[in-house]
Image (cartoon, rainbow, N blue to C red):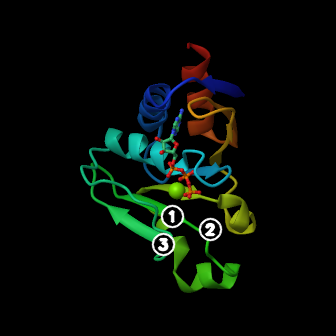
Amino acid sequence: MEIMVNSLKDTEQLGKIIGRCLGKGDVLCLDGDLGVGKTAMTQFIAKEFGVKEYITSPTFNIIKEYEGCLPFYHMDVYRLDSIDDMCDLGYEEYIYSEGVTVIEWSKKIEGILPEERINIEIKRIDDDRRVLYICGNGKTYDKLVRELSKL
Ligand SMILES: Nc1ncnc2c1ncn2[C@@H]1O[C@H](COP(=O)(O)OP(=O)(O)OP(=O)(O)O)[C@@H](O)[C@H]1O
Ligand SMILES: [Mg+2]
């Protein structure tokens, strides 16, 4: 499905809805050009899990863990050289855990992602406006589509 956001505030609203749909073990993938708003969206989602810390792109360490009502894992695989590096990082322990995982630049590691996940591709229209293309598989994705259809 396709959603239009007109401002950062709209992205915050959407992040709230997405955050409320996500639960134990869910994986959300965020893709789109540099500076399009992947980390901003992650921040708004994390807020729903009671993450107080400010989220920055974990570009150099790839994976960052935050304390919330569930463990919240934020990955940015932009600088990853190969899928082998992802294995070395023990990514499975995060993705297949009780926590929630948000992955920026997920397309780079598509081959190792679980079938059940939500994918959001963000496209920039101008300074403030974005289009979000949302697709996925699984119960949480179905729930999200139901919630977003109410908008
Ligand atoms: N509607 C919007 N949604 C999201 N971000 C927006 C929006 N309008 C403006 N912005 C701005 O766009 C920027 C997005 O930066 P952000 O770090 O989230 O991008 P990113 O996709 O994570 O980049 P990178 O690929 O470098 O990790 C922020 O400065 C944010 O304030
Ligand atoms: Mg980012």
Q: Which residue is mark 3?
A: 93
Q: Is mark 1 within 8 Å of ligand 2?
A: no
How many circles with numbers are drawn on the protein? 3
Question: In the image, what residue occupies the spot 33% across and 42% down?
Answer: 47
Query: Which numbered marker is on residue 78?
Result: 2
Residue 129 at x, y = what percent?
61, 29
- For the residue pair 100 and 83, the one nearer the viewer reads as 83
User: Given this view, does label 1 or label 3 mark the residue nearer the observer?
Assistant: 1
Image quarter where the C terminus lies is: top right
Residue mark closest to the camera, 2 vs 1: 2
Q: Which mark is residue 8?
A: none
70 horizontally vs 3: left or right: left
Query: Can residue 133 be seen in the rendering of this structure?
Result: yes
Q: Quarter of the image containing the N terminus?
A: top right
Q: Nearer the viewer, residue 72 or 59?
A: 59
Left or right for 133, reference 128: right
Q: Is residue 100 above or below residue 109?
A: above
